[in-house]
Image (cartoon, rainbow, N blue to C red):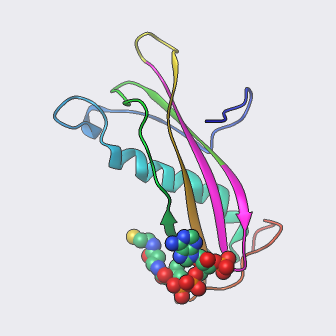
Amino acid sequence: MNVSPGREPAIRVSMMPKDTNIHGTIFGGVILSYIDQAGAVAARPYAPVRMVTVAMKEVVFKEPVLVGDMVSFYAQVTHVGHTSVTVHVDVEAERFRPYGLRVPVTAADVVYVAVDDAGNKIPAVKDGSGA
Ligand SMILES: CC(C)(COP(=O)(O)OP(=O)(O)OC[C@H]1O[C@@H](n2cnc3c(N)ncnc32)[C@H](O)[C@@H]1OP(=O)(O)O)[C@@H](O)C(=O)NCCC(=O)NCCS
């Protein structure tokens, strides 16, 4: 987990009761979905047309996410290949109670591939300058 002070998250989400399992904590799959979205925000400037997710590496949940938590998803591009872009996403929950307590939840490496409108892979934009 590497969330440096002042670093801006790609997305921040407040967790609602609709996202809980029967134990009252947030579904892991909900967090995975936001990881994918946050990674895509960082990866998008490297896609001339659009990106698809090809792989999400092992994700281990160290702490639960609770209803009312404000969850931040920090995304950083770590590798740009020929057609692929790898993004590291750190997830941190800010507790509703005790208010403001920050807890590292998980991290993931997500790989996106640049594709054209037909879904065929195409070269990524090496410098992330967009289309
Ligand atoms: C993404 C897709 C276009 C790739 O096509 P492909 O012919 O299988 O592509 P390749 O095997 O040549 O891989 C393309 C790039 O992805 C990388 N890649 C593929 N599988 C990977 C994996 N499991 N882990 C890490 N990188 C991977 C390759 O290393 C390559 O990177 P590079 O060009 O930078 O060297 C195709 O697999 C696809 O359409 N998948 C579905 C994507 C999708 O719909 N995602 C949402 C699911 S709901």
Image quarter for ligand 1 equals bottom right
Q: Is residue 62 above or below residue 120?
A: above
Q: In the image, residue 50 lies at what x, y percent?
A: 60, 74
Q: Which residues are magenta?
A: 76-95
Q: In the image, residue 101 lies at what x, y percent?
A: 51, 15
Residue 79 on the magenta segment: yes
Q: Quadrant of residue 24?
A: top left
The answer to whether residue 53 is seen in the rendering is no
Q: Main secondary structure of the magenta part?
A: strand
Q: In the image, residue 81 lies at what x, y percent?
A: 72, 73
Q: Residue at x 66, y 56 (%)?
A: 42
Image check: 2 left or right of 107? Answer: right
Q: Nearer the viewer, residue 88 or 130?
A: 88
Q: Residue furthest top?
A: 98
Q: Nearer the viewer, residue 46 or 79?
A: 79
Q: Quadrant of residue 61?
A: top left
Image check: 80 left or right of 52? Answer: right
Q: Quadrant of the C terminus?
A: bottom right
Q: Is residue 4 above or below residue 106?
A: above
Residue 90 on the magenta segment: yes
Q: Residue at x 66, y 35 (%)?
A: 2
Q: Residue at x 72, y 76 (%)?
A: 124
Q: Is residue 28 above or below residue 22?
A: below
Image check: 62 left or right of 131? Answer: left
Q: Residue at x 83, y 67 (%)?
A: 127
